[in-house]
Image (spheres, rainbow, N blue to C red):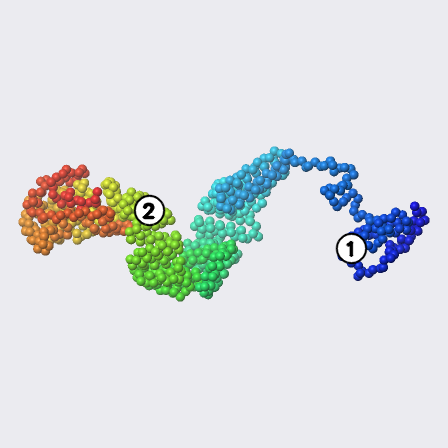
């Protein structure tokens, strides 16, 4: 053991050496000779190394951390650079963890879950649930499911009231969430308004605007005004708009101008045009940036209602000066498209089809369409009235459009100008205007060519109509109206199959082209394909719902197919529908014919009489009514109908003969004789008239020899001309009726050649010719006494061989 003196000497030696000793026997090395790639980390040497060597104490082997640089007998022991009690190896490595108090064996208890939430936590969870319901309600409304959105809004309101009651019960009123109540009430009011529950929405809005705790609650008077506006309570709407306007600060100009615009709309609806003009002009005082196209159009309408031509012009110019985002690129894009070749246009169209337009571009296109629509409507409205002549007005409007950068709309007004000429039957000027478009852009040229084709078609110039239809189709293959015009030309040329193909192509281009569908049904009827025609008109009826022409064609097709009950259903619908034609004589006559075929003579008589009341010149209806009264032996009632028929067809002697026969049947022999004599004077060669003159003279005990001589002369002349005996009059007998006579109007559906004969039934066999009746036979068959004037019951069978014999009535009456 070293003494104190030796220890102090050793320490002084270490201080003097400054730990910079050199091991004997090893030459010094510089840094360039040392290989640092194989150096292992180890503790730095300390003074204890030399102390042990000098003292001759316990030898400690020096680890070979320096690659054999030190001697084992003089090296100091390695010291630890880690804290006591810890090691890099875990428990899995087998080493013992430093735990002097053995606390690791006891373990720790897991965290215990709360068995019950506190009152405040429950209320917080309810608030989260209410927030979630309000958000879901708003999202559902945006998706279009209004009923479900309202239910979620009601559920949120119910839970919010429950939350308020719980806070009140637990004395937590200071924690009431006013903003949450405000959001719930506002959402519920909006959902009621969206579902047209106006009274509920107004009640909630009233509660919101009266509560001063809600921020900006006064703005919702605009919503209340919108509800009153929808209910057409214009005064209440204006009141709410003005109250909302008072609560909007002046720095929020956009909202204030919109409210002022709504006030102008309400005054416009009330026809208070001066007040509406004041509201609209207040917007113009602050610049045109707050004026939209609807407001500008309404301002022009107000000027138009007051008849102020100068203001209409200025209002139209203000409408053209409205600045709209995206409108400045409208004509530029069209110019770019016009400068492209066909291949470039196809490539551009393909690229647009694959890529599509973004939401911003779609919105700009929508605004462009709305702006163009308002400008075109305003121009068409004021053009005929702003100048002394309509043509001058159209010229001023077109010049203004071209000057303000709307050349395309100006071209559309040119087409409207041509339509104005068409309405005035000035076809030459209309053609002159439309022909100017032959050298313009393809879209306008196609529109003008379509109108020219239709115009020439109306003038029956089918060659020119087909020429311009081909031009329109060539300019725009997907122009459905041009295809319809082309099909119409083929239809008039009796090319029904080709016309059908063109109509089908037009329907393929535009599935809702009503003209193409209607004409397709007509062409199918002409070629006898009634089932295909029925399909076309059924589709058209599903689109138009109540269209008189379509319902007429459906009834006509069913009647041709022999389905009389279905035809009766369509014609009845045409008469009884609110938008139908209850006074159309053609429809009433068709219904009467269907009732007659069904054996209901009473209903047939009713509808024939109604048809005669609205159109008293239809020969088929007049004939049926006259024969009906004759069958009922009501001769006095039949006389007006036969007299009307004689006025309509004055060259037909048979109608006057029927009137004379009615007089003779009634027993009014003087009137009958006078009428026969008048007929004989106007038609001296009518054999039937001469025969009846002989008969009535015998009944009245008057001379008839000269009539008998004239009758024999007429019979010999007839035998010489025809080689066989037959009547030479315009009718074979008095009881013959006008058959195969065309109907003279009476309905939009046209006329039928045979009113009383079904087209599907074969014609009746012709009757054998009767030999001329001798005078003595006529005399033998004369009735001995006059028939009663009026008789409703059917008469008994008699041997009267008069001109109203039962055998001959079948030629006049419709088949039973």
Corner quadrant of residue 390: bottom left
Q: Nearer the viewer, residue 665 or 114?
A: 114
- Quadrant location, the C terminus: top left
Residue located beneath label 1 in the image: 39
Q: Is residue 666 above or below residue 500?
A: above
Say which mark, if any, is on residue 580: 2
Q: Nearer the viewer, residue 2 or 755?
A: 2
Q: Residue at x 31, y 52 (%)?
A: 524
User: Callout 1: few (<14), some (14-19), or many (20+) C-alpha neighbours within 10 Å?
Assistant: few
Q: Nearer the viewer, residue 180 or 124?
A: 124
Q: Is residue 458 above or below residue 202?
A: below
Q: Secondary structure at mark 1?
A: loop
Q: Residue at x 14, y 42 (%)?
A: 666
Mark 1 or mark 2: name the one nearer the start of the chain: 1
Say which mark, if any, is on residue 464: none
Position in image of residue 790 (x %, y %): 17, 40
**Does 792 sit left or right of 105 as displayed?**
left
Q: Secondary structure at mark 2?
A: loop
Q: Nearer the viewer, residue 511 or 459?
A: 511
Q: Residue at x 50, y 46 (%)?
A: 143
* Tag in front: 1 or 2: 1
């Amino acid at each position: 053991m070293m003494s104190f003196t030796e220890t102090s000497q050793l320490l002084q030696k270490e201080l003097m050496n400054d730990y910079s000793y050199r091991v004997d026997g090893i030459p010094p090395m510089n840094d360039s000779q040392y290989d640092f790639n194989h150096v292992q980390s180890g503790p730095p040497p300390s003074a204890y190394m030399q102390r042990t060597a000098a003292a001759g104490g316990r030898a400690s082997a020096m680890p070979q951390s320096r690659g054999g640089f030190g001697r084992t007998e003089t090296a100091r022991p390695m010291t630890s650079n880690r804290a006591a009690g810890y090691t890099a190896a875990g428990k899995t490595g087998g080493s013992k963890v430093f735990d002097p108090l053995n606390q690791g064996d006891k373990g720790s208890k897991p965290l215990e879950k709360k068995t019950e939430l506190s009152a405040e936590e429950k209320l917080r969870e309810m608030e989260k649930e209410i927030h979630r319901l309000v958000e879901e309600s708003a999202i559902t409304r945006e998706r279009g499911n209004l009923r479900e959105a309202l239910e979620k809004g009601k559920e949120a309101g119910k839970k919010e009231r429950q939350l308020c009651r719980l806070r009140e019960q637990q004395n937590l009123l200071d924690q009431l969430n006013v903003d949450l109540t405000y959001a719930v009430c506002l959402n519920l009011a909006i959902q009621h308004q969206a579902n047209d529950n106006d009274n509920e929405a107004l009640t909630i809005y009233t509660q919101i605007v009266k509560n001063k705790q809600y921020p900006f609650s006064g703005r919702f008077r605009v919503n209340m005004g919108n509800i009153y506006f929808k209910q057409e309570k214009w005064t209440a709407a204006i009141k709410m708009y003005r109250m909302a306007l008072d609560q909007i600060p002046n720095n929020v100009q956009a909202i204030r101008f919109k409210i002022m615009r709504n006030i102008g709309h309400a005054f416009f609806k009330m026809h208070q045009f001066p007040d509406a003009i004041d509201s609209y002009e207040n917007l113009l005082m602050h610049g045109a940036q707050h004026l939209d196209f609807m407001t500008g159009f309404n301002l022009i309408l107000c000027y138009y209602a007051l008849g102020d031509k100068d203001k209409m012009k200025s209002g139209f110019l203000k409408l053209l000066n409205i600045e709209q985002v995206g409108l400045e690129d409208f004509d530029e894009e069209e110019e770019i498209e016009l400068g492209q070749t066909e291949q470039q246009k196809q490539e551009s169209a393909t690229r647009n089809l694959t890529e599509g337009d973004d939401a911003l571009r779609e919105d700009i296109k929508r605004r462009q369409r709305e702006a163009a629509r308002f400008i075109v409507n305003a121009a068409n409205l004021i053009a005929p009235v702003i100048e002394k002549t309509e043509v001058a007005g159209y010229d001023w409007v077109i010049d203004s459009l071209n000057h303000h950068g709307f050349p395309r709309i100006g071209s559309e007004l040119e087409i409207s100008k041509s339509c104005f000429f068409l309405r005035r039957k000035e076809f030459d000027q209309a053609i002159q205007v439309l022909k100017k478009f032959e050298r313009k852009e393809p879209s306008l040229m196609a529109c003008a060519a379509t109108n020219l084709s239709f115009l020439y078609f109306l003038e029956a110039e089918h060659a020119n109509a087909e020429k311009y239809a081909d031009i329109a189709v060539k300019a725009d293959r997907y122009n459905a109206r041009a295809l319809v015009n082309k099909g119409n030309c083929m239809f008039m040329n009796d090319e029904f199959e080709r016309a059908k193909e063109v109509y089908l192509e037009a329907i393929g281009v535009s599935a809702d082209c009503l003209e193409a569908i209607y004409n397709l049904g007509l062409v199918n009827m002409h070629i006898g394909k009634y089932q295909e025609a029925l399909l076309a008109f059924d589709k058209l009826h599903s689109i138009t719902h109540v269209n008189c022409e379509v319902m007429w064609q459906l009834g006509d097709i069913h009647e041709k197919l022999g389905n009389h009950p279905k035809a009766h259903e369509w014609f009845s619908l045409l008469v009884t529908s609110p938008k139908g034609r209850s006074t159309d004589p053609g429809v009433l006559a068709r219904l009467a014919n269907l009732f007659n075929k069904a054996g209901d003579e009473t209903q047939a008589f009713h509808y024939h009489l109604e048809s005669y009341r609205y159109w008293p010149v239809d020969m088929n209806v007049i004939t049926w009514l006259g024969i009906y009264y004759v069958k009922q032996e009501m001769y006095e009632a039949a006389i007006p109908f036969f007299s009307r028929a004689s006025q309509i067809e004055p060259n037909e002697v048979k109608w006057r003969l029927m009137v004379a026969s009615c007089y003779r049947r009634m027993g009014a022999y003087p009137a009958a004789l006078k009428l026969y004599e008048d007929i004989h004077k106007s038609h001296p060669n009518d054999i039937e008239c001469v025969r009846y003159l002989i008969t009535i003279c015998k009944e009245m005990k008057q001379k008839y020899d000269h009539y008998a001589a004239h009758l024999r002369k007429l019979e010999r002349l007839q035998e010489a001309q025809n080689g066989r005996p037959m009547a030479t009059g315009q009718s074979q007998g008095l009881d013959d009726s006008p058959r195969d006579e065309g109907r003279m109007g009476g309905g939009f559906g046209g006329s039928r050649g045979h009113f009383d004969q079904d087209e599907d039934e074969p014609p009746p066999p012709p009757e054998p010719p009767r030999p001329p009746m001798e005078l003595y036979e006529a005399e033998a068959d004369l009735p001995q006494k006059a028939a009663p004037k009026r008789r409703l019951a059917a008469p008994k069978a008699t041997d009267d061989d008069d001109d109203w014999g039962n055998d001959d009535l079948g030629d006049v009456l419709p088949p039973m």
